[in-house]
Image: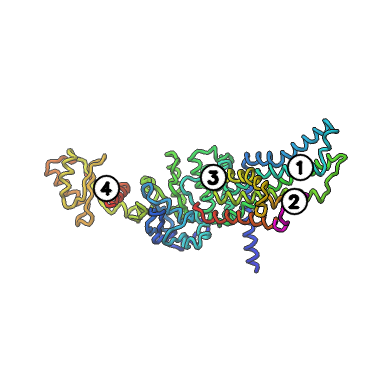
C-alpha cells in the first residue's frame, strides 16, 4: 500500500515536471506572449479606455463606460478576439515540439508518448488561464468603477461571465491542441482553425441549421444572458464535451502512432 | 564507473541485440534481417555508405519508428515491450540534433531532463561542462553554430547517465579540432564503462574510435567483428619498385597472390587467404621473384589491410553481385 502511494506521488511529480517544461516552452516564445497579451488583455484595456474617453467627451451622448451592458459587450469581444489567441497557444502546445524536431528527442527518453501529449494540456492552460483572469479582472474592475449612474454588475454575474469566457477560450485551446497534434504542422493547423473559427463557423451559425452539432452554438447557449439557441443546456454541455474529447483523442492517438 | 552499471549493462554480454530485424517502406527494404550484437563496454561502429539503413535501424532501436519484423533487446530488455525501462539508460543523438531555437542551451536540456527521472535535472551542469558549453549555456540556441549544437546534443544524451550511447553521424558539422576532441570524449565515455554505438559512413572516424565494427550495405550486415579481425583477415605486402605496371602484371599470376593494385604508397599485394605460407615467407618469395625478373625493388613491407580497403572490397563486391 505504502509503495503504491509512493509510486503514485513519484509519478505525479514526474508529470508536474513535464507540465513545467511545457509552460516554459510557451512562456519563452516572445511572439506568442506578445500576441496573447495583444489578443486577450489589450482589448479589455482599449475597450474601456475608448468607452471612458467617449463618455468624458460627450456624457449626454455616451453613457458611463462601466455597467452590465458594456461588460457583456467587452467580454463578447474578448471571446471573439481571445479565441484567436487560444488557437495560437493550442497550436504551439500541440505542434511546437514536432515543428522544432524536438519530439523525437523527447520520445527517446523512453517517456510514454501519451504522457508527453497529456502534459501539454495543463501546461497550455497554465499559460492561458492567468491571461483570461487578468483580462476579466480588468473588465470587472472597469465595469464596476466606471458604472456611474448605470447598473454595476454584481459579484455573481462577474463570476458567471468570467467562467463563461474561461470556458470558451479553454475549449478553443483544447480543440486547437487536439487538431494540431493530429495534423502535426503549426502553419496548417493555424490556417485550418482560424478559417473555421472566423469564416466557416459564423456562416453556419447564421444559417441556424447545424446548431445541434456546432460547438459555437453550444457556447452561445450557455452564455449568461445570451441569445437563445434552439438546443437545451444539457445538449450544449454534452456537445462541448464531445467535441473537446474527440479532438483531444485524435491528437493523442496521432501522437502515439506517428513516426517521430 | 557509471552508477548502477553493474546492475544492468555489465550483467549482459550484449547491450544491443537484434534478430531478423527488418523494416520495409512499401516495396523497399531499408533494413533487411539484421542480426546485430553490440558487446558491453565497447565503442562499436555501425559502418555503411549513405542510404545503407543505419539511421532506420537506430530509429527502430529507439522506438521512433516500428519494425516490420524481428526482435530487439536494449540493455538486456526486450523492446518495445520494456521500452521505457530500457531507454532510461540510453542516451542518443539521431541525425542532426534538434532544439527549440528560441530557448537557451540550458533550457533545452531542462526540457528533456523533465521527461527523464528526477536526477537528470541535476546532471545538466555537469553535462554542459563536459562538452565545453558551460559558459554559453544561457545563450539562445539560435545563436549556436552547428558544432555547438552537436555538442549540446551530446550533453543532452548524457542527461540519462547512459549505459549505452547511440550516436548517429555525430561528427557532422564539427571542425577538425572538434572532431579530435569528440573522439577523446567518446573514448573517455567508454573507459567509464559505457557502451557507445556509433553509426557513421566515415571509415576514418570509425577506425580511430571503435573497437568493433559491423559493416552494413543495402540494409544488411555484411560483416561484423572486432576491428582487428576485420582488418587482419587479409595480409598485404607493400612494394616499392621501379616499374609498377610490370610488377602488377608479374605478380597477378603468382599462386600466393590474390590481387596486386597500385596505390599512392606503392603496389599493394593482397595475399590469398589460407595459402600455406607466412607473410614473411611470401615477402621473401616475391622479392626473389621480382629481382630475378629484373625489377629493382627498393621497398618491401608487410601491412594489414586498412578498414577502408576492407570496406571498399566488401561493398564493391556486393555492388557487383547485386
- Which residue corresponds to mark 3? A100
**Looking at the rendered structure, which numbered label has been put on residue B159?**
none
| Residue matched to label 4 | B303
Q: Residues within 10 Å of mark 2 (few under 14, many from 20)?
A: few
Q: Nearer the viewer, residue A92 or A17?
A: A92
Q: CA distance from mark 1 to mark 3?
A: 39 Å
Q: Is residue A223 left or right of residue B54?
A: right
Q: Earlier in the sequence, mark 2 or mark 3?
A: 3
Magenta range is A222-235
Q: How is the image coloured?
A: rainbow
In contact (CB < 8 Å): disc 4 and disc 3: no
**Image location (x, y in percent) of residue B137:** 57, 42
On residue A228, which mark appears?
A: 2
Q: Secondary structure at mark 1?
A: helix
Q: Nearer the viewer, mark 4 or mark 3?
A: 3
* Residue at 47% over, 49% down: B94
Q: Position of residue B185 (x, y in %)?
A: 46, 47
Quick check: is A142 in the magenta stretch?
no
Which residue occupies the extreme top position in the image?
Answer: A57
Q: Does residue B299 appear to the left or right of B166 in the view shown? A: left
Q: Main secondary structure of the magenta part?
A: loop
Amino acid at each position: 500500500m505504502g509503495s503504491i502511494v509512493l509510486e503514485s506521488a513519484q509519478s505525479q511529480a514526474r508529470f508536474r515536471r513535464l507540465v513545467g517544461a511545457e509552460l516554459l516552452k510557451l512562456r519563452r516564445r516572445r511572439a506568442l506572449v506578445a500576441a496573447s497579451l495583444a489578443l486577450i488583455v489589450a482589448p479589455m484595456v482599449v475597450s474601456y479606455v475608448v468607452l471612458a474617453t467617449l463618455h468624458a467627451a460627450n456624457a449626454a451622448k455616451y453613457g458611463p463606460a462601466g455597467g452590465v451592458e458594456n461588460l457583456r459587450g467587452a467580454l463578447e469581444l474578448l471571446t471573439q478576439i481571445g479565441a484567436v489567441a487560444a488557437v495560437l497557444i493550442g497550436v504551439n502546445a500541440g505542434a511546437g515540439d514536432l515543428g522544432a524536431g524536438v519530439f523525437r528527442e523527447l520520445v527517446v527518453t523512453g517517456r510514454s508518448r501519451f504522457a508527453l501529449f497529456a502534459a501539454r494540456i495543463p501546461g497550455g492552460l497554465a499559460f492561458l488561464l492567468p491571461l483570461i483572469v487578468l483580462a476579466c479582472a480588468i473588465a470587472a474592475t472597469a465595469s464596476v468603477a466606471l458604472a456611474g449612474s448605470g447598473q454595476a454588475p454584481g459579484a455573481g454575474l462577474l463570476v458567471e461571465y468570467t467562467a463563461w469566457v474561461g470556458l470558451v477560450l479553454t475549449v478553443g485551446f483544447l480543440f486547437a491542441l487536439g487538431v494540431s497534434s493530429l495534423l502535426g504542422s503549426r502553419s496548417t493547423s493555424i490556417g485550418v482553425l482560424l478559417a473555421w473559427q472566423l469564416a466557416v463557423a459564423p456562416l453556419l451559425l447564421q444559417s441556424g441549421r447545424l446548431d445541434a452539432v456546432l460547438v459555437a452554438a453550444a457556447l452561445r447557449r450557455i452564455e449568461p444572458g445570451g441569445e437563445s439557441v434552439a438546443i437545451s443546456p444539457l445538449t450544449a454541455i454534452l456537445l462541448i464535451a464531445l467535441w473537446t474529447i474527440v479532438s483531444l483523442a485524435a491528437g493523442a492517438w496521432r501522437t502515439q502512432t506517428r513516426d517521430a | 564507473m557509471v552508477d548502477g552499471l553493474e546492475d544492468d549493462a555489465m550483467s549482459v554480454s550484449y547491450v544491443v541485440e537484434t534478430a531478423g530485424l527488418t523494416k520495409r517502406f512499401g516495396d523497399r527494404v531499408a533494413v533487411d534481417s539484421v542480426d546485430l550484437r553490440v558487446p558491453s563496454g565497447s565503442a562499436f561502429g555501425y559502418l555503411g555508405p549513405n542510404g545503407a539503413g543505419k539511421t532506420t535501424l537506430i530509429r527502430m532501436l529507439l522506438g521512433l519508428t516500428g519494425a516490420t519484423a524481428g526482435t530487439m533487446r536494449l540493455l538486456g530488455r526486450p523492446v518495445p515491450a520494456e521500452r521505457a525501462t530500457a531507454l532510461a539508460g540510453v542516451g542518443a543523438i539521431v541525425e542532426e540534433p534538434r532544439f527549440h531555437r528560441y530557448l537557451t542551451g540550458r533550457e533545452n536540456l531542462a526540457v528533456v531532463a523533465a521527461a527523464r527521472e528526477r536526477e537528470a535535472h541535476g546532471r545538466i551542469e555537469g553535462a554542459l561542462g563536459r562538452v565545453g558549453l558551460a559558459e554559453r549555456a544561457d545563450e539562445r540556441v539560435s545563436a549556436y553554430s552547428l558544432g555547438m549544437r552537436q555538442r549540446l546534443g551530446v550533453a543532452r544524451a548524457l542527461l540519462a547517465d547512459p549505459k549505452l550511447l547511440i550516436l548517429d553521424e555525430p561528427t557532422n558539422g564539427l571542425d577538425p579540432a572538434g572532431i579530435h576532441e569528440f573522439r577523446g570524449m567518446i573514448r573517455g565515455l567508454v573507459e567509464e564503462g559505457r557502451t557507445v554505438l556509433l553509426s557513421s559512413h566515415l571509415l576514418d572516424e570509425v577506425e580511430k574510435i571503435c573497437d568493433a565494427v559491423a559493416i552494413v550495405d543495402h540494409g544488411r550486415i555484411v560483416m561484423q567483428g572486432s576491428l582487428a579481425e576485420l582488418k587482419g583477415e587479409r595480409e598485404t605486402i607493400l612494394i616499392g619498385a621501379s616499374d609498377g605496371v610490370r610488377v602488377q602484371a608479374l605478380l597477378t599470376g603468382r599462386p600466393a597472390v590474390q590481387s596486386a593494385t597500385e596505390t599512392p604508397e606503392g603496389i599493394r599485394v593482397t595475399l590469398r587467404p589460407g595459402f600455406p605460407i607466412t607473410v614473411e615467407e611470401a615477402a621473401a618469395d616475391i622479392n626473389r621473384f621480382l629481382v630475378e625478373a629484373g625489377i629493382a625493388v627498393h621497398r618491401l613491407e608487410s601491412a594489414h589491410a586498412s578498414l577502408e580497403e576492407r570496406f571498399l572490397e566488401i561493398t564493391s563486391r556486393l555492388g557487383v553481385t547485386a
